[in-house]
Amino acid sequence: MILLLTGLKDRQDNQSIWKKVLELVGNFDLDPDRVLDLIVDARLMSNNDSHFIPLLRQFNKNSVTLVIGNRLKQGQSSATEPLA
């Protein structure tokens, strides 16, 4: 999944990328929420987000909101924790 996401190019067909994601989820019995989390990770590491938007739109809006909200919550809690 990581190789697929890090190799995305703007000129690739969004439908073919989505089909590859679904094939990976089905073939390896991946958790769709974890796949969504990986897509968010790949977006955060990327300088260009335009090719991730169509992928994120394929997921349930509530799931996207939950994953991004959890990510923000984790970032906030790690920023407020004192260094040991």
Image (cartoon, rainbow, N blue to C red):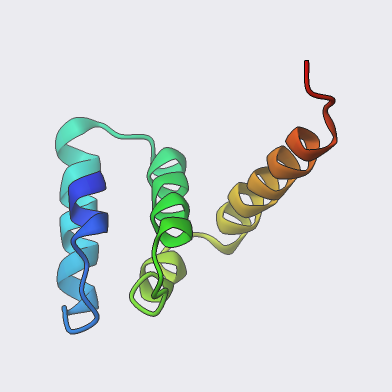
40 is higher (above) or lower (below) than 76: below
- Which residue is at a point 17% across and 79% down the rendered structure image? 13
Q: Is residue 49 visible?
A: yes
Left or right, 11 with respect to 63, comes to left
Pick the residue in front: 47 or 4: 47
Q: Position of residue 16 (x, y in %)?
A: 15, 70
Residue sitting at the far bottom: 11
Q: Position of residue 35 (x, y in %)?
A: 37, 45
- Which residue is at a point 42% across and 57% down the rendered structure image? 45
Q: Position of residue 37 (x, y in %)?
A: 47, 46
Left or right, 83 with respect to 8, comes to right
Residue sitting at the far front: 84
Residue sitting at the far top: 84
Quarter of the image where one finds residue 80: top right
- Which residue is at a point 39% across and 64% down the rendered structure image? 46
Q: Is residue 1 visible?
A: no
Left or right, 81 with respect to 46, comes to right
The quarter of the image holding the N terminus is top left
- Which residue is at a point 24% across and 81% down the rendered structure image? 10
Number of callouts = 0
46 is higher (above) or lower (below) than 1: below
44 is higher (above) or lower (below) than 37: below
Pick the residue in front: 66 or 40: 40
The quarter of the image holding the C terminus is top right
Pick the residue in front: 81 or 7: 81
Q: Position of residue 44 (x, y in %)?
A: 48, 58
